[in-house]
Amino acid sequence: QVQLVESGGGLVQAGGSLSVSCATSRSIFSRYTMGWYRQAPGKQRELVATITSGGSTNYADSVKGRFTISRDNAKNTVYLQMNGLKPEDTAVYYCNTKIALRDYWGQGTQVTVSS
């Protein structure tokens, strides 16, 4: 059973910062790429950022320079630090990992940015 447990998020004014985190088991965390996706109302889910088990990162163009994905190997947790938030960042943020071509998702956490 793959479990991804998210926390964080909330409401912030434009220009502010928030962070979200995702914890999973050591067997998953140490082997697979972890990622964050988001889905705004009426829109498709989109990639935000990924980080490999070796620490290589990848970001969507829309968040480059503002968001930072990181991982704490001791805690089996991946983080997404979001700075310079914009109203268009408002969405439900989902933690993700892919195992044997199958996607696994966290429960999602709401991030709302007011203008």
Image (cartoon, rainbow, N blue to C red):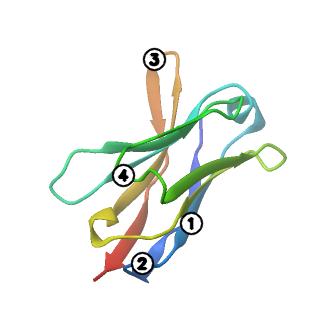
Task: Residue 38: give its label.
Answer: 4
Mark 1 highlights which residue?
Answer: 19
Give the alpha-carbon distance from disc 2 to disc 4, as whole Å: 19 Å
Give the alpha-carbon distance from disc 1 to disc 2, as whole Å: 13 Å
Mark 2 highlights which residue?
Answer: 15
Label 4 CA crowd tier, 10 Å (few <14, some 14–19, many 20+): many
Give the alpha-carbon distance from disc 4 to disc 1, as whole Å: 14 Å
Q: Furthest-top residue in view?
A: 100
Label 1: which secondary element = strand
Mark 4 residue type = Arg
Mark 3 residue type = Leu
Work out which quarter of the rendered image holds the C terminus and state it. Answer: bottom left
Mark 2 residue type = Gly
Work out which quarter of the rendered image holds the N terminus and state it. Answer: top right
Residue visible at 72% across and 39% down in the picture = 25
Q: Furthest-left residue in view?
A: 42
Label 4: which secondary element = strand
Task: Residue 101: give its label.
Answer: 3
Q: Is residue 114 left or right of residue 57?
A: left
Q: Furthest-right residue in view?
A: 74
| Closer to the camera in the image, 28 or 84 | 84
Residue visible at 46% across and 53% down in the picture = 107
- Where residue 15 appears, as percent x and y from the top left, is 42, 78
Q: Reading the chain from its start, which is encountered first: label 3 or label 1?
A: 1
Residue 1 visible (yes or no): no
Q: Reading the chain from its start, which is encountered first: label 4 or label 1?
A: 1
Label 3: which secondary element = loop
Label 3 CA crowd tier, 10 Å (few <14, some 14–19, many 20+): few
Mark 1 residue type = Ser
